[in-house]
Image (tube, rainbow, N blue to C red):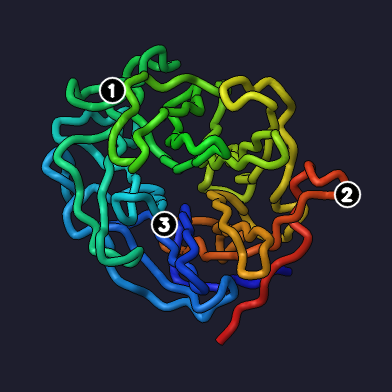
Amino acid sequence: MPRPVYRADFPDPGVVRDGGRFVAYATGDQVNAARGETASGPWRSLGKALPSLGPWAMAGRGVWAPDVVKTSAGWVMYYSAVPIGAKKVGDSYQRCIGVAVSKSGPGGPFAATSRPLICPTDPGAADRVPGRPVASAGVIDPSPFRASDGRRYVVYKTQQMPSSIRMLAVSGDGRSGAGRPSRELVRHSGIIEAPVMVERRGRFFLFVSRFSYANCSYATRWLWSSDRWRWTGPHNDLLTTAKTGLCGPGGADVAPSLDGGTRIFFHAWNTRSPSPTRRRQLYAGILTWGRDGLTPTVSGFLRPAG
C-alpha cells in the first residue's frame, strides 16, 4: 500500500516546483505550506503562507484548496475564502476566490489583493460566474493553467449541487481577469471538484475529484478534449480506494518532476473511518501516459524520504 510522503494533516494539496525542490499548500487557516527537498521529501512545514486574507474576506473561516503559479508578477496564489456578509447554505458558507502575490519566494508571505478575482456577490470581481447551476452558489478549488499558446487561465468549481467546473481567462501575470467572463466546462448532478488542467500532444486533460471527500468513496478521475472549452467525453478512474488501497484518494494536483516526468500529489485519509479528528495526508505518485502517450496512468507511488 502507498505510504504518505508527509504525515501532517494536509488536505487539498496544491504543489509547485521551485528549482530542485517542491512547495505544497493545503486547506487551513492562513494557508499551511510545506517544502519538500524532493517529491518524496523530506517535507517540512513552512508555517502560514497567507497572513491576511484580504479586506474582502472573513478571518477565522479557513482558506480552502490554495494553489500557486510563478508569473511575471512573482509567485501568485489563488485561494477560496468566505467574503464578508456571506450566507451559509447547509453547513457551508458560500465562498469567493482571491489572489495573493509573493515577491520573496513560493513559501511566502503572500499579500492578498483588495478585491476577489472570482465572486458572484462582489461587483468589483473580474468574474461574477454567470449561468452557474445554482444562483446562490459560491466558488472554490481554484487551479492555474497555462496553455501552450501562452494564455493563462484559472479553473475552478461552483459550490452546491448540481456542481460545475468553470474556467476564466486571466491576464499574463495572473493577477486579474482578461476581460471576459468564465465559461462552464463540465456540469454534474453530484459532486465534481478539485479541477486541474494539463495540455499534452494537442489534447487537454482535466483531472477532477468525485463524490464526498468525507468518506472513502472520494476518487480522482480524468477527462480529455481536443478543445479546452468543450468537454463531452467519459470520466475515467485514476485514483480510487479499490485501485490504491487508500481511503478517499483525491484533491489531486500535478507538477513536473526533476527527471522530466510528472508527479501527481493527492491526499488520502489515515483511517477507514474519516472524521474531523483524523488526517488527510500527502501522497505522491508517478503520472505516466500509457503506450499511446495519451492515457493518464499512475504507474507507481513514491516512498517517503527522511
User: Of the residues shown, which amino acid type is indicated by label 3?
Assistant: Pro
Mark 1 or mark 2, earlier in chain: 1
Give the residue at x 72% y 47%.
238
Between circles 1 and 3, the one closer to the viewer is 1
User: Of the residues shown, which amino acid type is indicated by label 2?
Assistant: Arg
Where disc 1 sits, the SS reads loop
| Residue 7 seen by the camera | no
User: Picture quarter containing residue 28?
Assistant: bottom left
Give the residue at x 40% y 58%.
26
Mark 2 or mark 3, earlier in chain: 3
Give the residue at x 19% y 60%.
51
Which residue lies most toward the right here? 291
Q: Estimate the spatial distance between the alpha carbons at disc 2 and disc 3, rounded to whole Å.
A: 41 Å
Q: Which residue is mark 1?
A: 120
Between circles 2 and 3, the one closer to the viewer is 2
Q: Are marks 1 and 2 in contact (CB under 8 Å)?
A: no
Mark 1 or mark 3, earlier in chain: 1
Between circles 1 and 2, the one closer to the viewer is 2
| Quarter of the image that includes the C terminus | bottom right
Give the residue at x 41% y 51%.
69
Can you tell which mark lies on residue 252?
Answer: none
Where disc 3 sits, the SS reads loop
Q: Is residue 238 above or below residue 91?
A: below
Q: Position of residue 42 (x, y in %)?
A: 51, 81
| Residue 301 seen by the camera | yes
Q: Which residue is mark 3?
A: 276
User: Picture quarter containing residue 301?
Assistant: bottom right
Q: Which residue is mark 2?
A: 291
